[in-house]
Image (spheres, grey):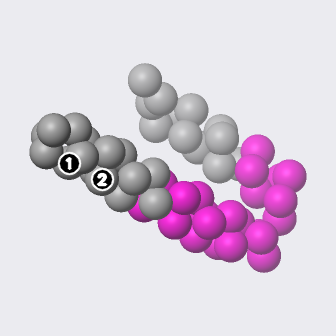
């Protein structure tokens, strides 16, 4: 599990690598990817329940 200290370190490294202008764009893309993944897994589970 990732603790609060690790999250701060990951955020600082991401800020150094990508810069402050790119981080919101990357976060948005990650959020949309996660949303699509959840939607796909939900559809797969619903298809299995129908069988």
Residue 28 vs 18, above or below: the answer is below
Q: Secondary structure at mark 1?
A: helix
- What residue lies at 39% left-to-right and 53% top-to-bottom? 40
Q: Is residue 51 visible?
A: yes
Pointer 2 with pointer 1, Cβ within 8 A: yes
State which quarter of the image contains the N terminus.
top left
State which quarter of the image contains the C terminus.
top left
Residue behind mark 2: 43
Q: Nearer the viewer, residue 45 or 4?
A: 45
Q: Nearer the viewer, residue 48 or 8?
A: 48
Q: Which mark is residue 46?
A: 1
Q: Secondary structure at mark 2?
A: helix
Q: Position of residue 32 (x, y in %)?
A: 52, 66
The region drawn magenta spans 13-35
- What residue lies at 83% left-to-right and 53% top-to-bottom? 16
In the image, taking residue 17 as reference, residue 48 lies left or right, namely left
CA gap between label 2 and label 1 equals 5 Å
Q: Is residue 38 visible?
A: no
- What residue lies at 58% left-to-right and 70% top-to-bottom? 28
In the image, taking residue 30 as reference, residue 21 lies left or right, namely right
Q: Farthest left residue?
A: 50
């Amino acid at each position: 599990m990732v603790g609060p200290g690790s999250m701060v370190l990951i955020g600082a490294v991401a800020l150094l690598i990508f810069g402050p202008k790119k981080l919101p764009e990357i976060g948005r893309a990650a959020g949309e990817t996660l949303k699509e993944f959840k939607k796909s897994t939900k559809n797969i589970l619903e298809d299995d329940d129908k069988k």
